[in-house]
Amino acid sequence: MTTTASVDTTIRLIDAGTEQGSTCSADLAAGPWAFDLLAPGYGPGASMHDVVPPAAPRQGELPVEYREADADELDARIRAAKDALGERVVILGHFYQRDEVVAYADYVGDSFQLANAARARTEAEAIVFCGVHFMAETADLLSRPEQAVILPNLAAGCSMADMANIDQVEECWEQLLELYGTEPDADGRVPVIPVTYMNSSAALKGFCGRNGGIVCTSSNAETVLEWAFAHGQRVLFFPDQHLGRNTAKAMGVPLEAMPTWNPNEPLGGNDEASLADARVVLWHGFCSVHKRFTVAQIEQARAQYPGVRVIVHPECPMPVVDAADSYGSTDYITKAIAAAPDGSTFAVGTEINLVQRLAAQYPQHTIFCLDPVVCPCSTMYRIHPGYLAWVLESLVAGEVPNRITVSADVAAPARLALERMLDAKPPAQRGA
Ligand code: 13P
Ligand code: SF4
């Protein structure tokens, strides 16, 4: 599949039989509103088979005028609403959003950059966050209290974030403290520091804030783990085992010192001895988008394109990261491709919307997704221009739909954990 059309267009062409290729679900060609009133589910795409927690937010029915509007009408309505709102609204878009939504974003970036953008755009009354739920929560935490953060489709969650909930993490923490105690060592380091990936609920960020912990993103995970090891003897890392394992391994932590914690088993499925020797306890969570990438795909790419550079996201399983030429956050991937000499070939292991956009943006290179099956992130894909038009026009009419608000008791400690992350500096910048 080498097309440089948008993912949405590609899906439609494959569905119509006018383009070769395959998608992971025939339902991808339907409007996301087709899934809003069904039983809770992430929708078609990479995480469609993951289990949705019963309390996951549900999107109500999108008004029919938006469901039935064609692309040109939605484009005209979005532009008119944006013009009418002017500086009162800022639209943020994650790299994994479909092109048809990215087209309207005032700022496009990775989750770290978007958190900073939310903090910086203090003049806007409303921040429309085209991304997923935990990102909108983070924007609410970092923006001014008067600013409304709006998620155009409430069903845009994240199955990985949902793999760790606050009750499970509290239960795990209790067991670990029973084992490790709470006394600092001679260097003042506490027995264990909780580190949550940005891809987690505000409740888990709040847990970290309350317990001396910190947040990380895929672009600063190593800096944050260094911070954690300076403050603690070991780390409890959640919810993404792969980001935790790949990062700690690159820092020299042996695999034997990284047991996985399965929340459904006593002691997470470990014995006391292996937990006592642990440096990083890895929560058993994963991203279903990045789990699709395999070493066999990398071997296939190398056989087909000698000289190809394989670059993957650290949410990929460790054997895939090990077999790649390099790995990093979506921002890292974007910058690596921008800096490459003309005529480079890249096989990329991250979400297809970003890969296809990069392929269109850099026609001087050959850029393709490692996974030949078109399978976007289910929840990112729930945001469609129809929902964007609806929330913008609602704002013009003086209504504030789909506002994401973190309760004050959770917000204060969650902000603390985020501020610790924003203050943690990579080694080269220390003292600056
Ligand atoms: P980054 O934007 O931090 O690279 O994360 C990727 C991702 O999976 C977001 O959900
Ligand atoms: Fe969550 Fe993975 Fe989608 Fe990111 S790409 S929002 S981690 S499911």
Image (cartoon, rainbow, N blue to C red):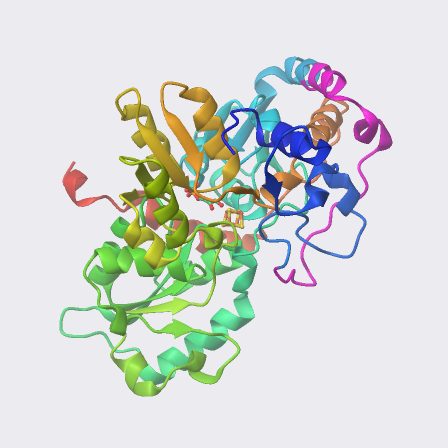
Image height of 188 relative to 61, above or below: below
Q: Is residue 61 magenta?
A: yes
Q: How many marks?
A: 0
Residue drawn where x is 46% and y is 63% of the image: 207
Q: Indicate the position of residue 319 as horizontal and vertical percent values.
A: 33, 58
Residue situated furthest front in the rendering? 303
Q: Can residue 429 be seen in this view?
A: yes
Q: Indicate the position of residue 44 as horizontal and vertical percent values.
A: 67, 47
Q: Is residue 190 magenta?
A: no
Between 55 and 361, the residue placed more toward the observer is 361
Q: Can residue 311 be seen in this view?
A: no
Residue drawn where x is 70% and y is 63% of the image: 54
Image height of 81 relative to 429, above or below: above
Image height of 371 relative to 269, above or below: above
Between 188 and 251, the residue placed more toward the observer is 251
Between 143 and 60, the residue placed more toward the observer is 60
Q: Specify the quadrant of the image occupied by residue 374.
A: top right
Q: Indicate the position of residue 379 as horizontal and vertical percent values.
A: 61, 45
Which quadrant does ligand 1 occupy?
top left
Image quadrant occupied by the C terminus:
top left
Image height of 242 relative to 145, above or below: below
Q: Specify the quadrant of the image occupied by residue 136.
A: top right
Left or right position of 79 against 266: right
Residue stretch rendered in magenta on the structure: 50-78
Residue drawn where x is 59% and y is 53% of the image: 47
Left or right position of 361 against 428: right
Q: Specify the quadrant of the image occupied by residue 181.
A: bottom left
Q: Indicate the position of residue 26 as horizontal and vertical percent values.
A: 70, 44
Residue drawn where x is 37% and y is 53% of the image: 295
Residue situated furthest right in the rendering? 64
